[in-house]
Image: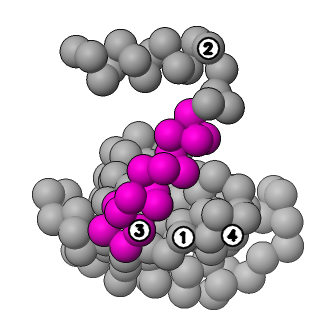
Amino acid sequence: MNATSDIKFRFNPASGKSSKVLGPLEAEIMEVVWEQGHTTVSAVHKELREKKDIAYTTVMTTMSRLAKKNILTQDKSSSSYVYAPALRKSDFERYVVTGIIHALLEDYGDTFVDCFVEVLGDISPTARERLHQEVCR
């Protein structure tokens, strides 16, 4: 998918990794879809049922919403819908992080930069060295 600007997500810093930008169930479903690749609601439901009691219709509705947010693609050409991730997990994560950084810079400018520099003081020496190498390339 090239039109990543069409992907819709929210940001909740208090949640876990994928749940920071997706709802908890959306994040669980995306983990399954990223693992399975092209898949169906039935296959995702079967995987989730191994971990918790969840209705098929709940999975179906959530996957349909993920498709409307352009996070999943939905192929309607066969007898059942086939879903696939719009982006690989790593590309989705980069898209989200880049979007958040741009939004913070746009909305908070100098405050964001000041806070970012302050937080950098708390990172490990290894991470700081990697950052330095990347910036000085």
Q: How far apart are marks 4 and 1 (CA)?
A: 12 Å
Mark toward the start of the polypeptide (1 vs 3) = 1
Element assignment for label 3: helix
Element assignment for label 2: helix
Q: Residue at x 43, y 22 (%)?
A: 131
Crowd rating for badge 2 (residues with CA inside 10 Å; few <14, some 14–19, many 20+): few
Instruction: Tell me which amino acid carries mark 4.
Output: Pro
Contact, mark 1 vs mark 2 (Cβ under 8 Å):
no
> Where residue 44 sits: x, y (%)?
59, 62
Mark toward the start of the polypeptide (4 vs 3) = 4
According to the picture, the residue beneath numbered tag 1 turns out to be: 11
Element assignment for label 4: helix
Q: Distance between the residues labelled 1 and 2?
A: 28 Å
According to the picture, the residue beneath numbered tag 4 turns out to be: 24
Q: Which of marks 1 and 3 is in front?
A: 3
Mark toward the start of the polypeptide (2 vs 3) = 3
According to the picture, the residue beneath numbered tag 2 turns out to be: 125
Contact, mark 2 vs mark 3 (Cβ under 8 Å):
no
Please determine whether, in this image, residue 64 is positioned above or below residue 103. Answer: below
Q: How far apart are marks 1 and 3 (CA)?
A: 16 Å
What is the magenta segment's predominant secondary structure?
A: helix
